[in-house]
Image: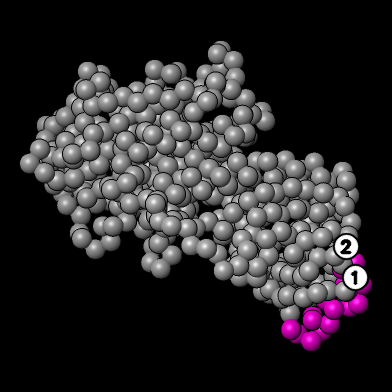
């Protein structure tokens, strides 16, 4: 979808629809009052008759309005708060976009409400990202595109009441569009079935992002090379699969060589059966989403490429399947990681940390200023935080605070959990340096404790997105999180 901004008179702009906002029980805003006068009081009459009250997410149409060149006006209810939360704004925009999809509108104008200049950027981004998120529709590759019964929404123009206000909205649209496209990529990769989205498919998608880019290079390490390097932990996960594992490394160079990169490491288990420690059959189909950490890293990489951010970034994706077979790793096996530390595999369904630990050790060779890993790692995180926040654990307070701030700014929030030494003994093993699980208590924390043993020399943070990465039930599908959080974090780094 195409987005733009203008300061032209909204009454004179030809479009299929004007979107405008109303706060319940509040006086009409200056823009809304002007539209009301132009339409000979039609808006106020709707409110007075209680045909439209302005409740959160409520919508009302005015067709063929007098005094404006748009064909329709769509009123969007914002509730009683004059400053709605991000969630409330998302809800309102999603409702409006759903109404627009059914209306036949293809080109709309959005009346930007009067607000403080420093809030315009965040508002504009949230609106754009909410529109794109609501318009997202997964389609199986190769399926014939159904001819739409109505025109599709293709263009939105944000209209400000003063020319000086176009700059923050324009920046919001630039950043928001790149982030929204990154989220769409992550959602699409997550939604693809595992017979299509294999480790090799992820590698090809990474190469596609780097195609024809002078400052972005992609290389892929195969299993033979992993064995030479000594990645015994990663290779232990792929043993039961016919699909070869891949280690995908993308280097984006947007700053001088003297600037150390930021490293993002994303778990890419394209299907997780649990291996020999087989998962229950119910909802195992959702294990196609166990590569959403990898998908979010690739979505963020694409956003950084599109924005041409002045940073250096390394994106690393260990990609594999986890399946049972006669060759699969067994509970009780001991493997040696790239770091030289030995691991007793007590549960083959705790495989994500095994591929991540070797990838985190590999990331050290780039001498990054910080490493952030993203993974659908533990069911315990879903129990603790549900779907609303990612779990955040870190060995660096400043990095943790930066990620928390980026989450608040982007509306893609995380919540910090402790990473105390008292949890480390749960990983003790009689036969290796550590076990790969820490027992039934504090599963999210002990998983991060495991990873912390491979990042002791680094400023490191771990995002457990097991609850945030996908929706269940009738809304089943990937969310594309935390692309927004990660990209916002990188934008903040560029602003310093």
Q: Is 61 on the left or on the right of 262, as rendered?
A: right
Q: Nearer the viewer, residue 291 or 386?
A: 291
Q: Nearer the viewer, residue 253 or 211?
A: 211
Q: Where is residue 382 drawn, in percent x and y? A: 37, 56
Tag 2's secondary structure?
helix
Label 1 crowd bin: few (<14), some (14–19), many (20+), radius 10 Å = some
Is 310 situated above or below 170?
above
Q: Is 27 on the left or on the right of 287, as rendered?
A: right
Q: Where is residue 158 drawn, in percent x and y? A: 76, 53
Task: Please give the name of the residue rendered at 55% of the width and 13% of the height, measured from the top-left corner.
Answer: 257
Residue 35 visible in image: yes
The image quadrant where one finds the C terminus is top right
Circle 2 is placed at which residue position? 11
Q: Nearer the viewer, residue 302 or 482?
A: 302
Q: Where is residue 386 drawn, in percent x and y? A: 42, 58
C-beta proximity under 8 Å, tags 1 and 2 = yes
Q: Where is residue 43 drawn, in percent x and y? A: 83, 76
Task: Please give the name of the residue rendered at 64% of the width and 45% of the height, measured from the top-left corner.
Answer: 176
Tag 1's secondary structure?
loop
Q: Which residue ends up furthest to the left in the rendered image?
A: 326
* Residue extent of the magenta highlight: 34-51
Task: Please give the name of the residue rendered at 79% of the width and 81% of the height, measured from the top-left corner.
Answer: 46
Q: Nearer the viewer, residue 262 or 269?
A: 269
Secondary structure predominantly adopted by residues drawn in magenta:
helix
Circle 1 is placed at which residue position? 67
C-alpha gap between disc 1 and disc 2: 7 Å
Q: Is 209 on the left or on the right of 286, as rendered?
A: right
Q: Is 460 on the left or on the right of 454, as rendered?
A: right
Residue 86 visible in image: no
Q: Which mark is residue 143?
A: none
Q: Quadrant of residue 406?
A: top right
Task: Please give the name of the residue rendered at 23% of the width and 26% of the height, measured from the top-left corner.
Answer: 223
């Amino acid at each position: 979808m195409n987005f733009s901004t203008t300061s032209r008179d909204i009454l004179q702009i030809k479009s299929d629809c004007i979107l405008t906002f109303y706060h319940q029980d509040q006086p009409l805003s200056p823009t809304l009052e002007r539209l009301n006068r132009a339409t000979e009081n039609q808006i106020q009459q709707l409110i007075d008759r209680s045909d439209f009250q302005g409740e959160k997410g409520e919508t009302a149409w005015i067709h063929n309005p007098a005094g404006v060149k748009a064909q329709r006006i769509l009123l969007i209810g914002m509730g009683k708060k004059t400053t709605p939360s991000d969630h409330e704004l998302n809800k309102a925009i999603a409702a409006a976009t759903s109404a627009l999809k059914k209306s036949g509108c293809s080109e709309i104008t959005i009346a930007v409400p009067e607000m403080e200049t420093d809030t315009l950027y965040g508002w504009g981004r949230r609106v754009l990202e909410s529109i794109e998120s609501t318009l997202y529709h997964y389609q199986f590759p190769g399926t014939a595109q159904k001819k739409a019964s109505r025109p599709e929404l293709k263009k939105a123009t944000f209209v400000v009441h003063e020319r000086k206000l176009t700059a923050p909205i324009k920046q919001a649209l630039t950043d928001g569009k790149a982030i929204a496209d990154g989220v769409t990529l992550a959602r699409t990769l997550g939604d693809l079935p595992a017979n299509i989205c294999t480790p090799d498919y992820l590698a090809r998608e990474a190469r596609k992002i780097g195609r024809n880019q002078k400052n972005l290079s992609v290389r892929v390490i195969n299993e033979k090379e992993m064995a030479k390097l000594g990645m015994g932990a990663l290779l232990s996960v792929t043993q039961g699969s016919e699909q070869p594992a891949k280690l995908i490394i993308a280097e984006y160079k947007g700053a001088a060589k003297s600037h150390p990169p930021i490293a993002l490491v994303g778990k890419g288990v394209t299907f997780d059966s649990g291996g020999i420690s087989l998962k229950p059959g119910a909802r195992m189909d959702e294990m196609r989403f166990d590569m959403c950490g990898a998908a979010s890293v690739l979505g963020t990489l694409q956003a950084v490429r599109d924005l041409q951010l002045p940073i250096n970034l390394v994106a690393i994706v260990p990609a594999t399947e986890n399946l049972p077979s006669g060759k699969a790793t067994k509970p009780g096996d001991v493997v040696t990681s790239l770091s030289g530390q030995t691991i007793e595999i007590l549960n083959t369904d705790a495989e994500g940390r095994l591929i991540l630990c070797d990838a985190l050790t590999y990331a050290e060779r780039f001498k990054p200023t910080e490493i952030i890993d993203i993974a659908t790692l533990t069911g315990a995180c879903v129990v603790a935080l549900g779907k609303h926040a990612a779990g955040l654990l870190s060995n660096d307070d400043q990095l943790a605070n930066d990620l928390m701030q980026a989450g608040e700014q982007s509306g893609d929030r995380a919540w910090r959990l402790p990473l105390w030494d008292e949890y480390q003994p749960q990983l003790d093993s009689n036969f290796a340096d550590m076990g790969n699980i820490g027992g039934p208590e504090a599963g999210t924390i002990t998983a991060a404790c495991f990873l912390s043993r491979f990042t002791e020399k680094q400023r490191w943070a771990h995002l457990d997105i097991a609850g945030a990465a996908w929706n269940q039930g009738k809304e089943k599908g990937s969310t594309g999180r935390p692309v927004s959080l990660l990209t916002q974090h990188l934008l903040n780094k560029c602003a310093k």
